Image (spheres, helix red, strand yellow):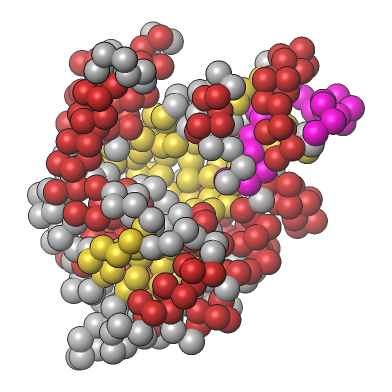
Amino acid sequence: MGTEPDSRPDAVLPVSSAPAIEPVPAVVLGLSATGLAVARALGRRGVRVTGVDTLRTPSATSRFVRFRRSPTPGTDAMLRFLIALAGEGGARPVLLATADEYAELIALNHDRLAGSFRLLTAPAAVVRDVSDKTRFMTLAADLGLPVPRAVTLGSGGVPSEVGTLRFPVVVKPDHFRAWSSERLRARGLAPAKAIPVADPGELRELVVRLGPLTERAVVQEMVVGQDDAHVDYHALAEPGGQIRAEFVGRKLRLSPPHFGLGTYVVSAHDPEVASLGREVLARLGYVGVANLNFKRDQRDGSLWLLEVNPRFSLWTALDVACGVDLPYWAYLTACGIAWAPPPAYPAGRRWVHALWDLRSMSGYRREAGPSWWSWMSSVLRADVEALGAWDDPLPLLASVAGAALRDARGRLPGRTR
């Protein structure tokens, strides 16, 4: 598990005008596994990286990161913090987002941040529209994007328009900030990106359980298929709309199973996904790094767009390990430096977030999914681990230690988990 920096010839970036001076620094917003992947990609290229987050996550222990604790995203204090941080160095840094709230922060405050940072971001209206599912439904209809039909719930119970949808459906928040794990658990629901619903009666029961959370929710037709029907398209679009680099990966396992984040992923070549991904970004007039989530419906083989995320993917480290160094290329583009990607990347390379993948196994085992031996074998075959790397071991060690400590505290008398 984990890889050393790739030394294959096709992973070496052929920069046509590499700077002879010290590289421009970078500020990475968000230090989840995504932020760690971005920081490592840049740090291994010699870029000085400042990692910003509201908490000191395990990724903050990386040798490629200078950690700075920040105010809450979306506040004026956060903007003042970033502008002051940019002024600490000589060169104007590149600012990169690795989570939805940071992508919104940059896009919606582009003019205020542009004087202090080098930015590469989609238009504010695009970021706002793709981040809000209600707005995205309208945008997708206007642009003719292949998005499953959906209806906004609101606070008035189940609207009559739900009768036009084909069941099963999923219920999901209209914005990433609308449902927290704590709010779902308080209503006896497991945290997930979407909640499956089999029929109208089950939907009415769920609406009652969600209570006020339905004010920020949509009901969408489910794309029926196994977890490996989820396929993602990652790309970097330059100003003017040209797709300079792209990558396709297929999810094999999710946490929680079926309606969560990808925890075990394989690189793939899928011309249909790549073609549709390019078409979607072109219609959006997109600029910067994008992560598009697709799923194939097992009933008819049709390919549906589930989400457009205006940021790096959770498993960006797999892209990089395959020679598609989106973090560094985005950095070079923001700096105005010419670059050329390698002509192809290998299919069949695997990425795992071992801790999250382990957490999802109890759900898979209840469904007679892979055995524990099969799971362990697949983890050991992975080429890249989300937190582990031979040249940067502390983030994984810190994460394992933190998980063990939380588990021990939960087992103390009088403590509940």
The answer, for residue 326, to whether it is visible in the render is: no
Residue at 56% over, 28% down: 184
Residue at 17% over, 31% down: 380
163 to 20, vertically: above or below: above
**Quadrant in which residue 414 is drawn:** top left
Residue 237 horizontal side relative to residue 127, left or right: left
Task: Please state the horizontal and vertical placement of residue 198, each as a whole percent of the image.
Answer: 68, 16
**Nearest the eye: 295 or 35:** 35
381 to 19, vertically: above or below: above
**Residue 157 part of the magenta-drawn span:** yes
**Nearest the eye: 131 or 139:** 131
Query: Which residue sits furthest left?
Result: 390
Task: Please state the horizontal and vertical placement of residue 118, each as a whole percent of the image.
Answer: 43, 81
**Which residues, given as a range, are shown in magenta?**
155-176
Residue at 25% over, 88% down: 19
Residue 196 horizontal side relative to residue 233, left or right: right
The answer, for residue 348, to whether it is visible in the render is: yes
Quadrant of the snapshot with the N terminus: top left
Task: Please state the horizontal and vertical placement of residue 161, each as a whole percent of the image.
Answer: 87, 31
Task: Please state the horizontal and vertical placement of residue 102, each as a whole percent of the image.
Answer: 48, 61
Residue at 36% over, 58% down: 53
Quadrant of the snapshot with the C terminus: top left
Residue 61 horizontal side relative to residue 71, left or right: left
